[in-house]
Image (cartoon, grey):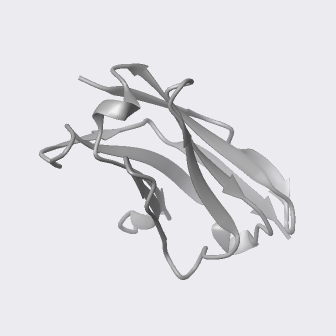
Amino acid sequence: QVQLVESGGGLVQAGGSLRLSCAASSGSIFSLTEMRWYRQYPRKQRELLASVTRDGSTNYADSVKGRFTISTDNAKNTVYLQMNSLRPEDTAVYYCNALGPYPVRYRAYWGQGTQVTVSS
């Protein structure tokens, strides 16, 4: 069982940056196949923003490509989402997601979510 704990959300002005962290408090992210970041607007479905596989392959949604970067630190058992050039429309609750165990995607784990608010 993998437990994910997110941090790093908050209030930032448009054009600013935030870095979200997702720490695996139990289990190892190296045992997982893929790590993802989603966001959710009120009364909307979660939107996949970025993903990274265990071999380091990354993918991004068009809405964040060039502004957001996903990365992992296996030594710290943490995945990050660096968010630059933030816009008011980036305001949402952000969730960390993990799929595994390696090499399959049978199980999904979720963090509790962290609020990001971008003021204009």
Q: Where, quadrant-wise, is the C terminus in this rendering?
A: bottom right
Residue drawn 76% across and 67% down? 86
Can you name the residue that lies furthest to the front here? 55
Image-based side of 79 in relation to 116, left or right? left
Q: Give whichever of 68, 39 is nearer the camera.
A: 68
Give the residue at the far top of this rendering.
26
- Residue at the extreme left: 106
Within the image, what quadrant is residue 109 found in? top left
Q: Which sits in the foreground, 43 or 69?
A: 69
Place residue 65 in its image quadrant: bottom right
Q: Is residue 91 visible to us here? A: no
Q: In this orientation, does residue 11 appear?
A: yes
Residue depicted at x 19% and y 37%: 101
Disc count in the image? 0
Q: Nearest the camera: 102 or 35?
A: 102
**Vertically, is 61 above or below 108?**
below
Where residue 32 sits, quadrant-wise, is: top left
Where is residue 70? Give x, y as percent. 57, 55
User: Of residues 9 and 32, which is closer to you in this image?
Assistant: 32
Question: Residue 87: horizontal and vertical position, in percent?
Answer: 75, 72
The residue at the point 12 percent across, 45 percent down is: 106
